[in-house]
Amino acid sequence: MSALALERVFHALSDPSRLAIVERLSRAPASVKELAAPLPMALPSVMKHLKVLEEGGVVRSQKSGRVRTSEINAAMLSAIDSWVAARRAAYGRAFDRLERMLDDGEDQ
Amino acid sequence: MSAAHTTFVIERRFKAARARVFNAWADPKLKNAWRSCHEDWRSQGYTLDFRVGGEEREDVVEPSGTVHGFAARYRDIVADERIVYTYDMRLDGRLISVSLVTVTFEDSGAGTKMLFTEQLVILNGLCDAAEREEGTGVGLDRLVAVLDAN
């Protein structure tokens, strides 16, 4: 994934309504109508948010007959997660070494 | 151009008392013994000036030749209780992230509870670094947890 792609992912996620949509879609794919039902907004607003999410590569959609169904693009999301997870993991390993050092009394 | 923000928190408990855990952050020799993360990367020298306004620096070279630059400045130090510092990371001189870190130390039984909180802004070009790191196909639950922490 290019740097640009990840930037678009972050942009797409930087909104509470879009995050709510992502959380809903992370449970199962849904139609625009289904997505709009629990949200305090009209269909056109939901479609606008979906467009941003699609442009960011966070969500994919396909049309079957007259119903458009959206789903999470898990690969895109895991790219962000893996970057933060990698940094976290590096600290985890460092803190493991710190613990061993203290337990072994190497600091004294 | 972009700037994306995230926060993560790591909680660790140590059997050692607070003063010893804190000292492992304050003493340059001890700090350097546990902090470096890649055995096969070559350090071009580590320095730590542990006082408010003091700097901590290290440039590390990967086997591929890529230079990772770390530069921190200490903002607040309360002995045995709290450390606040900012740092940035550079990849071959290019800025990839800037972070604000708060480390707190609390008594926990006979030992210590350490809370490490990093708030970071991720700048353009980080993915080059990210892609080399491990971890693919990680669950969405963890992503949501990261985002919730924001």
Image: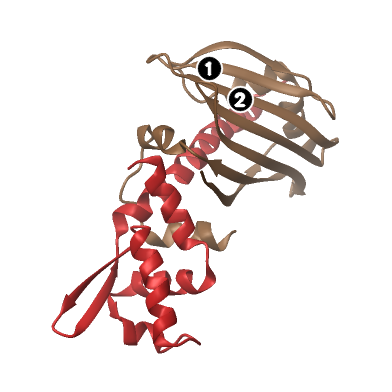
Residue B15 seen in render: yes
Are the residues at dot 1 and dot 2 in contact (C-beta closer than 8 Å)?
yes
Q: Where is residue B126 in the image (x, y as percent from the top left)?
A: 46, 37
Residue where numbered disc 2 is placed: B70
Q: What residue type is labelled 2?
A: Phe
Q: Where is residue A79 in the image (x, y as percent from the top left)?
A: 37, 48
Q: In which quarter of the image is residue A33?
A: bottom left
Residue sitting at x 72%, y 42%: B103
Residue sitting at x 59%, y 45%: B121
Any idea which chain is the brown one in this picture?
Answer: B
Tint applied to chain A in the drawing: red
The local crowd at label 1, few if under 14, some if 14 to 19, many if 20 or more residues have their Cα within 10 Å, is: many
Q: Position of residue A57 (x, y in %)?
A: 33, 58
Q: Nearer the viewer, residue B92 or B131?
A: B92
The local crowd at label 2, few if under 14, some if 14 to 19, many if 20 or more residues have their Cα within 10 Å, is: some
Q: In which quarter of the image is residue A42?
A: bottom left
Quarter the C terminus of chain A occupies: top right
Q: Which mark is residue B60?
A: 1
Residue sitting at x 47%, y 55%: A10
A67 lies left or right of B108: left
Chain letter for mark 1, please. B
Q: What secondary structure is marked by label 1?
A: strand
Residue sitting at x 37%, y 71%: A50
B25 lies left or right of B139: right
If you read the primary sequence from the N terminus, does the residue marked by circle 1 or circle 2 appear first?
A: 1
Residue B111 seen in render: no
A44 lies left or right of B30: left
